[in-house]
Amino acid sequence: MTAQVLAGAPAAAALLSRAAARARTLPRPPGLAIVRLGDDPASVSYVRGKDRKAREVGLQSTVYALPEETSQAELLALIAELNAAYDVDGILVQLPLPPHIDEAAVLRAVDPSKDVDGFHPVNVGELWSGRPGLLPCTPAGVMVLLEHYGIPVAGRRAVVVGRSAIVGRPMAALLLAADATVTLAHRRTPDLGAVTREAEVLVVAAGRPHLVTPEMVRPGAAVVDVGINRVLDAAGVSRLTGDVHPDVAGVAGALTPVPGGVGPMTIAALLANTVTAAERRLGLSGPR
Ligand code: NDP
């Protein structure tokens, strides 16, 4: 058996085209403000990608590229300005921030109704109370991917490996909201394989190359590999690889590739969130 490949591109394209159609019905384009500090090459490239896609979908995107040495007070002043701006519906602060900035304080400063990353404690609390507001993008993207490929979640055993605030925890909350029976595993979980083998839907977000091997996977399971790890191959060439060993394709029923699986879903979910934020702020919440 070879697992069905859950490619992100078609699911992301479908989500983006729904978001673009919703954006066109609004009285003005949804506005996205992207803030980044410094010149970390990965951040610069992520921000460029988000900005480009936002424009393609018909959003009004503005990048605020601030110098590395920007003070916390200056950054908070910019966020206050964006919070108050009528035509800004979504504010995204690209992480990580330089060490002199208190990241949690900055994320708390974003108006929850404009928090398109879904990191504000108000949105986190709403998610866990079963009244989701703006959803964290990577887990929201995983849910759209599963839905796109018709993979059922309700009533099934789901296991999430990793409990970070940006992926593992909100992923567990969304699977729970979709009526799965959810287990959250982490480094202190004894016998990880025994836990993952119970999963009919397995989401791995540990940041450990090839942590999940075929004997850890229940035959026929849907496996979502969120991990993005840069490793050197046998020839010494740097490559991206996931947290799931490629041989899992021989056991799983469905498997996301890395790259090209969850990655494209994250940006699409961010832009869909921005449209949702605009609809809510303009009092025009429509179907998602
Ligand atoms: P973190 O490092 O913040 O969290 C990793 C989690 O995995 C922790 O909860 C940790 O457990 C758990 N973990 C680590 N090693 C093991 C192990 N051996 N066994 C069981 N659990 C383990 O990472 P993130 O959540 O931020 O990211 C996870 C991965 O997803 C990374 O590769 C990242 O690059 C990728 N990613 C991909 C995105 C995409 O768009 N595709 C977006 C965001 C992230 P503990 O809490 O006990 O330490």
Image: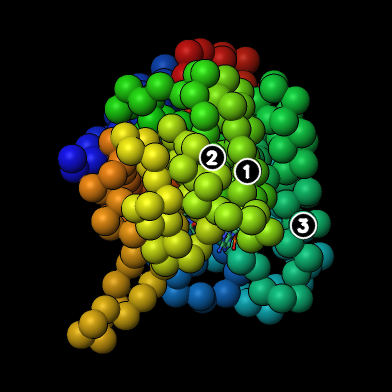
Vertical side of 188 occupied by 10: above or below: above
Q: State which quadrant residue 234 falls in.
A: bottom left
As drawn, is 69 to the left or to the right of 224? Answer: right
> Residue at position x 54%, y 40% from top?
159
State the CA–CA distance, disc 2 to disc 1: 6 Å
Residue indicated by mark 1: 184
Ranked by sequence position, the earlier of labels 2 and 1 is 2
Kindly identify the amino acid type of the residue bearing the numbered disc 3. Ala
Residue indicated by mark 2: 159
State the CA–CA distance, disc 2 to disc 3: 28 Å
Q: Where is residue 184 in the image (x, y as percent from the top left)?
A: 62, 43
**Circle 2 SS class:** strand
Mark 3 surroundings within 10 Å by alpha-carbon count, few (fewer than 14), some (14 through 19), many (20 or more):
few
Q: How is the image coloured?
A: rainbow
Kindly identify the amino acid type of the residue bearing the numbered disc 2. Val
> Residue at position x 36%, y 25% from top?
151
As drawn, is 80 to the left or to the right of 173? Answer: right
Answer yes or no: is residue 175 visible.
yes
Residue indicated by mark 3: 104
Q: Position of residue 59 (x, y in %)?
A: 43, 37
State the CA–CA distance, disc 1 to disc 3: 23 Å
Kindly identify the amino acid type of the residue bearing the numbered disc 1. Leu
Mark 1 surroundings within 10 Å by alpha-carbon count, few (fewer than 14), some (14 through 19), many (20 or more):
some
Answer yes or no: is residue 116 visible.
no
Ranked by sequence position, the earlier of labels 2 and 3 is 3
